[in-house]
């Protein structure tokens, strides 16, 4: 479950934050049918921070029914308050999740001991495997190696989802993490334009935004990189490059809503205050998609 390609779809909602059940079910079924290794529901791409507790649980229930046991379901349970995150963890387990993903969401900047105690509490709220979500781009909190090592000793903490290393030294960072975490602890990355390099360097998993809507080419890239086929992995990564440029320019969250509309998967605006990508970017996006599907 914590290896290979984990695909993170958007969560289609109406303007009041109510999950569009049929649209979400179609996305989940499509991912499971394609054969991704896991589905990351209610991650950053899934807009978890914009949804109520009730809608988050409802999304898990919809996804669980749609996936029908074909693919493990990893559910994001990040929240500002520790008790709220604990409740979300219990909700996710009761609704049928196979694993949890936790980011230290905050308004007041957190220190390492606060994050550690937060994880202790949430990890103890269920017996599901928990993935550390190291996403300083949104949380403004960066996990140190010391903190990851400490958290990896908790009974249910089974993996880490890392951001791309600033210097691009995947092999060095993965080596440091392996030396400091227990055997079997899964090391994965996010930041789609780094997928090929991360997996070629020995990462166990890639947590992918684009795979949530484009699972077939994403899975091909993942399989090539994990097999050590550098030439094929780089060829596929190059095919994705126009899309990576759009992700970096406008933010992948916004671009994914435009991709969904272009492919006819669902029609919904990003939750406000987030705005759609500008109209002038749409032809570039369409061309990028056509190149990948051609």
Image (spheres, helix red, strand yellow):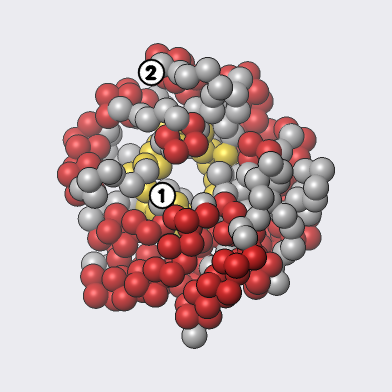
| Vertical placement of residue 164 versus 66, above or below | above
Image x and y of residue 34, in percent: 55, 70
Give the mark, 1 or 2, whose residue is nearer the N terminus: 2
| Mark 2, secondary structure of its residue | helix
Quadrant housing residue 267 = bottom right
Quadrant housing residue 107 = top right
The answer to whether residue 159 of the structure is visible from this angle is: no
The answer to whether the residue labelled 1 contacts the one labelled 2, judged by CB atoms less than 8 Å apart, is: no
Q: Is residue 156 left or right of residue 165?
A: right
Which of the numbered marks, if any, corresponds to residue 190?
Answer: 1
Residue in view at x 78 percent, y 54 percent? 20
Residue in view at x 60 percent, y 67 percent? 280
How packed mark 2 is, by other alpha carbons closer than 10 Å (few <14, some 14-19, many 20 or more), is: some
Q: How many marks?
A: 2
Image x and y of residue 277, in percent: 61, 58
Image x and y of residue 60, in percent: 68, 45
Residue found at the very far front of the displayed protein: 280
Q: CA distance from mark 1 to mark 2?
A: 22 Å
Which of the numbered marks, if any, corresponds to residue 112?
Answer: 2
């Amino acid at each position: 479950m914590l290896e290979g390609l984990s695909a993170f779809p958007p969560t289609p909602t109406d303007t009041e934050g109510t999950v569009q059940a049929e649209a979400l079910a179609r996305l989940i079924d499509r991912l499971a049918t394609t054969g991704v290794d896991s589905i990351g529901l209610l991650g950053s791409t899934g807009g978890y921070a914009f949804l109520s507790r009730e809608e988050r649980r409802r999304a898990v229930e919809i996804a669980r029914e749609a996936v029908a046991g074909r693919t493990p379901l990893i559910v994001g349970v990040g929240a500002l308050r520790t008790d709220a995150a604990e409740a979300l963890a219990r909700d996710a387990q009761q609704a049928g999740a196979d694993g949890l993903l936790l980011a230290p969401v905050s308004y007041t900047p957190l220190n390492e001991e606060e994050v550690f105690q937060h994880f202790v509490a949430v990890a103890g709220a269920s017996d599901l495997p928990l993935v550390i979500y190291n996403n300083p781009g949104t949380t403004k909190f960066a996990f140190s190696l010391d903190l990851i090592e400490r958290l990896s000793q908790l009974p249910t903490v089974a993996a880490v989802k890392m951001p791309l290393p600033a210097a691009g030294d995947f092999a060095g960072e993965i080596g440091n993490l392996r030396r400091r975490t227990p055997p079997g602890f899964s090391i994965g990355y996010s930041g789609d334009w780094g997928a090929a390099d991360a997996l070629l360097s020995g990462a166990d998993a890639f947590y992918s935004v684009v795979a949530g809507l484009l699972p077939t080419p994403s899975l091909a890239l993942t399989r090539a990189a994990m097999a050590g086929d550098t030439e094929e992995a780089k060829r596929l990564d190059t095919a994705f490059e126009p899309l990576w440029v759009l992700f970096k320019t406008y933010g992948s969250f916004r671009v994914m809503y435009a991709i969904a509309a272009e492919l006819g998967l669902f029609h919904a605006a990003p939750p406000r205050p987030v705005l759609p990508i500008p109209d002038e970017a749409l032809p570039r996006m369409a061309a990028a998609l056509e190149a990948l599907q051609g």
